Image (cartoon, helix red, strand yellow):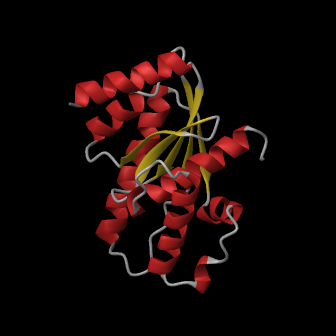
Amino acid sequence: MDFIIFAVKIQVCSIMEGRFVLGVDPGLSGGIAVVGMDGVAVDVVSMPETMQDLLEYLRSWCSDDCTSVCYMEKVGFGMPGQSSKATATFSRHCGHLEMALLSLGIPTNEVTPQKWMRHYQLGRSSDFSKGEWKNRLKSKAQQLFPREKVTLKVADALLIALYGVRQEKGGV
């Protein structure tokens, strides 16, 4: 099954011979979304569980005919109430992501949550509970990507990827 999915991704790239933006919401409960320059989602996945799975997934978006750029949420700060072990685990995972992207030659732009969220004009996150805010983001992703199965794991990645597409087009 994995081979078939991988083959489909390569076929999509070679047919489209296009440029894709990878939106990355780092962390094990995050996801990766791949959006074409036309704003259409090409692939959406929950964050791969192992370093090898992550590397193989990202590698599937590298070829001579298919160029990708990554927009990754800028994180790296511990969350209030998070244990030092959890912070260290999260930081290591972010490092794995950064190294995979670097080793594959995928240019990466870090964008703060405040910046990409402000782009969608959904109000201030501080005006909502965490659950309400996450559902607000999910709802926006569902509105912009009606053909995708949008979950809380991939909603941010989709919005980050579309933000990246708009930035690549000159901040439209």
Out of 39 and 6, give the one closest to the viewer: 39
Examine the image and state in which quarter residue 140 appears.
Answer: bottom right
Q: Where is residue 151 shown, x and y percent of the image?
A: 39, 60
Out of 107 and 7, give the one closest to the viewer: 7
Quarter of the figure that contains the N terminus: top left
Residue in view at x 33 percent, y 21 percent: 7
Q: Is residue 73 visible?
A: no
**Is residue 116 shown left or right of residue 139?**
right
| Count of residue discs | 0
**Is residue 103 shown left or right of residue 83?**
right
**Outermost residue toward the left in this view:** 1
Q: Where is residue 41 shown, x and y percent of the image?
A: 52, 41
**Outermost residue toward the front in this view:** 147
Q: Is residue 41 visible?
A: yes
Q: Where is residue 102 shown, x and y percent of the image?
A: 49, 33
Residue in view at x 58 percent, y 54 percent: 144
**Is residue 22 shown left or right of residue 48?**
right
Residue in view at x 64 percent, y 45 percent: 164
Examine the image and state in which quarter residue 152 appears.
Answer: bottom left
Residue in view at x 51 percent, y 52 percent: 146
Considering only vertical position in the picture, is 172 above or below 137? above
Q: Where is residue 130 shown, x and y percent of the image?
A: 47, 79
Out of 112 and 103, give the one closest to the viewer: 112
